[in-house]
Image (cartoon, rainbow, N blue to C red):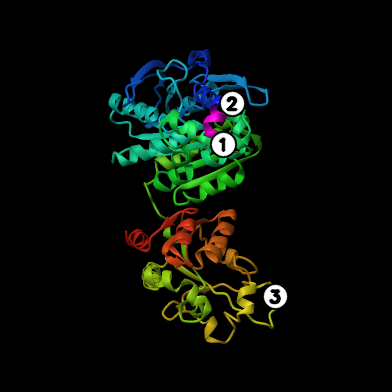
Amino acid sequence: MIISFLLSNCGITSKVRNSLTPQRQDVNSFPESYKINYEAISFQTQDSLNLKGWWIKGTSDITVVLSHSFGSNRSGWKGCDAKGNFHEINWLPSIKVLADAGFNVVAFDHRACGESDGEMTYFGKMEALDIVAVINWVTQRDSMLTKFGIVGFSSGANATLKAIQILENEDTKLELSGIAVNLYWYERMIKNSTKFFTNVPSFMIPAINKSTRKIVGFNPKIEINPANDLSIINSPIRIVNAEFDEIASMKDIFDIYKKGLKHSELSILKNENRFEAYHFIENHQDDVISYFVNTLNAKKNKVEFNQAAVLLIEFQKTWTEKGIFNNIIKNEYVQRNVLSNTKKVIQKAREKGIKVIQAPLILDKTDVNYKKTPLPARLLKQFTVDTWKSEFTDEIYDNSDIVIKGRYGFDATEGSDLEQQLKLNNIKTVYICGFTTDHCVRETMNSLIAKGFVCIMISDCSATKNSKLQKKIEDEFSIISSNELIDKITD
């Protein structure tokens, strides 16, 4: 009743619908003004919408697809932001950069924009079908063109991730790579930027979400989640966001990035806002060109295991044998076969010459950093030096392993030489396991990712007090199972 009252009195449904139905703008600049030869094209989506665009034939075997932002079209956009500030986007300089590099280029109007069919936009979910339609059009025209780079902006960035999912699931022979500029995560964005879409106060969010689900026909809190999208796809993705993005915080972008570390890169545009980031291609020409050349000419899913290591956090008898700490994780530790899985992983790693790094926590009252160690361990006298509590779990340690020194925090980099050891051994990718998932593993991963390392959790080689908490932490990061990692190492 209350929501119905609010909707009827505040017009939330109408505002939401209007916000998803942008005023069409004319395609008012064309490639010939930039001395670019092009062909006007039209093609149809699988849900029977006719889209309009430009095809620019290049000399390369790489085709780059431009997926524009909300309310824009293939030539650009003019208008004011929520604060009334005027902005103008012109995609033609970006198109020229790509065409001059020799790429084939497709610029097109998404549904409900420019000259294409459609009445509403969908945060990128349905727009993914537009990108798929573009690529299908290209491959039908020339079956030899199988390498595609997609550059998406805002909702077009969300659409880029979803389109790559669809294309990968179709099990085609396509090689795909994406640059996602100005990604946003609906659930987080709507909490902080309600005015950007609807001009209503934040206490109306429940009403907005209910209306939005009804209007678009899906739940954007579930469907518009780039972190989940990134965790599913396998193609290389570069995430690009402005440092001062008005609707996506750096924390949001970092949390998205953590889910795709196996195949993604992160670029933060220092001192730029969201509208400045729309000029990414023209302002970072060499970067964009080299990214697509390198990713689309590289062996797909190649893993550089000579630059990888397996990091074991606190595989010590305090956790795995008996006592208070063991009781905390015992059920999960046993049910998930953590010890057996970990032994198999490190055995295979050692066979293949992959570094195994041990990160024990050892409490020594004579150490100057003793009082910096975690309070629960000190109070309960766990991990005590020269006792069984600090010993490695049986069959976990080998003389060839690297044992880090100086550690005193939950985060295994605190006070230790872990970062130095990784750099000394030219390690770029770290597969992490240990205890507990929600403390030491989580904090170490966040720290190493922030320092520029690729960190992937071996999900069934770690444990915490219950499966719900384990899943919560796994959802924050890029993960791999022990069997999946062993298969990759063996290939």
Q: Front-most of 414 and 453?
A: 414
Is 169 on the left-hand or right-hand side of 16? left
Q: Which residue is mark 2?
A: 10
Q: Secondary structure at mark 1?
A: helix
Which amino acid does the dot numbered 3 rest on? Answer: Lys
Is 94 on the left-hand or right-hand side of 60? right
- Could one spot residue 351 in this view of the protein? no
Is 341 on the left-hand or right-hand side of 277? left
Q: Which residue is mark 3?
A: 371
Pointers 3 and 2 in contact (CB under 8 A)? no
Q: Front-most of 92 and 68?
A: 68
Q: Front-most of 220 and 133?
A: 220
Q: Which residue is mark 1?
A: 205
In the depicted structure, whether residue 218 falls above or below residue 49: below
Q: Nearer the viewer, mark 3 or mark 1?
A: 1
Instruction: Report the span colored magenta.
Output: 1-7
